[in-house]
Image (cartoon, rainbow, N blue to C red):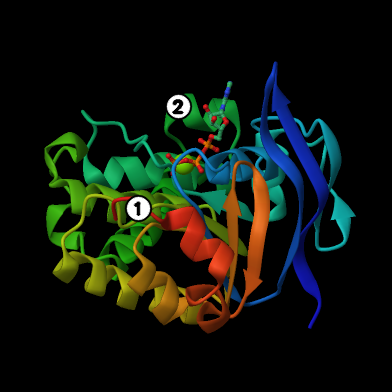
Amino acid sequence: MSSHLELKRVNKSFGGIQAVRDMSFSIPKGEIAGLIGPNGAGKTTIFNLITGVYDVTSGDIEYEGRNINRLKTYQVVALGVARTFQNLRLFAASSVLENVMTAAQYHHKYSFFEAVSHLGRWSKTERIIRDESMELLHRVGLADRADQSAGTLPYGLQRRLEIARALSLKPDLLLLDEPAAGMNAEEVATLNDLIVKIHEDFKLTILLIEHHMDMIMQICHRVVCMNFGAMIASGSPEDIQDHPEVLKAYLGEEE
Ligand SMILES: Nc1ncnc2c1ncn2[C@@H]1O[C@H](COP(=O)(O)OP(=O)(O)OP(=O)(O)O)[C@@H](O)[C@H]1O
Ligand SMILES: [Mg+2]
């Protein structure tokens, strides 16, 4: 199986803090990979490096065999990478549907004139975007909330809305940063099913950051564990579960 995403000896320093140290791993196309580690381990920084929010200090990031070190975020998105954020980035005052439509517009080109005049291709495009966005809301179970303002949704549903927004970018690689944070056991179980379903239906490769180990164990094909910026173990969920370094890293951590 060819590698969809590969990190080769990636380092990232912020002044004196080395947030990522010599990280190397690859994700085969179509797999669900987990990225775990205690708070401050460097997980979100990895997402920010992949998506061009930060430049690597050294090392290489390859997407489908192509080096993407220097690409800007919009260029990485154009290659087929979408993400959700640990700290939600929804437009709280806009409706649930508008939140998805705003992201979806990225994929539909129309001229500025058509946009301002609401003529021709634009209105047709808007209809398509609206239909596609509603379809995504159906998938994540938010269709009946389409007109509600996003900020008034319960937290767990806001996380699902973030997933719909990311999917509207039509990604091949989906990066999920703690999608189950703040959810109760029942909500986590439903989210599990949703991720498995979208993985299958959209033929996605997924990189999942999570502290809910049961979720990692159930849906990931492979897992990378990091601590203090460096990889301490990688392998199947079973390998990781009993790995002495992983147990040590999590010791004393509240889950
Ligand atoms: N922009 C930045 N400037 C300075 N330090 C940063 C920056 N971004 C991250 N860091 C530092 O890098 C380290 C890793 O942070 P990161 O957010 O990647 O951790 P994490 O594994 O996602 O943690 P959590 O589980 O709490 O979300 C931390 O020490 C953090 O303070
Ligand atoms: Mg984080």
**Identity of the residue drawn at 65% across and 69% down:** 234
- Horizontal arrangement in the rendering, residue 217 relative to residue 110 (left or right): left
Q: With respect to residue 217, does 40 lie above or below?
A: above
State which quarter of the image contains the N terminus: bottom right
Q: How many numbered circles does the render carry?
A: 2
Which residue type carries mark 1?
Answer: Arg
What is the crowding at mark 1: few (fewer than 14 residues within 10 Å), some, or many (at least 20)? some
Q: Residue 117 carries which label?
A: 2
**x, y (%) of residue 167?**
46, 58
Front-lying residue, 166 or 110: 166
* Of the image marks 1 and 2, the number of the one nearer the N terminus: 2
Q: Residue 82 carries which label?
A: none
Q: In this view, does 153 lie to the left or right of 230?
A: left
Residue 227 shown left or right of residue 137 in the figure? right
Quarter of the image containing the C terminus? Answer: bottom left
Rendered image quadrant of residue 151? top left
Q: Residue tagged by mark 1?
A: 130
Can residue 30 be seen at all in this image of the molecule?
A: yes
Quarter-wise, where is residue 174 in the image? bottom right
Mark 2 is on which residue type?
Ser
Depicted 32 relative to depicted 160: above or below: below
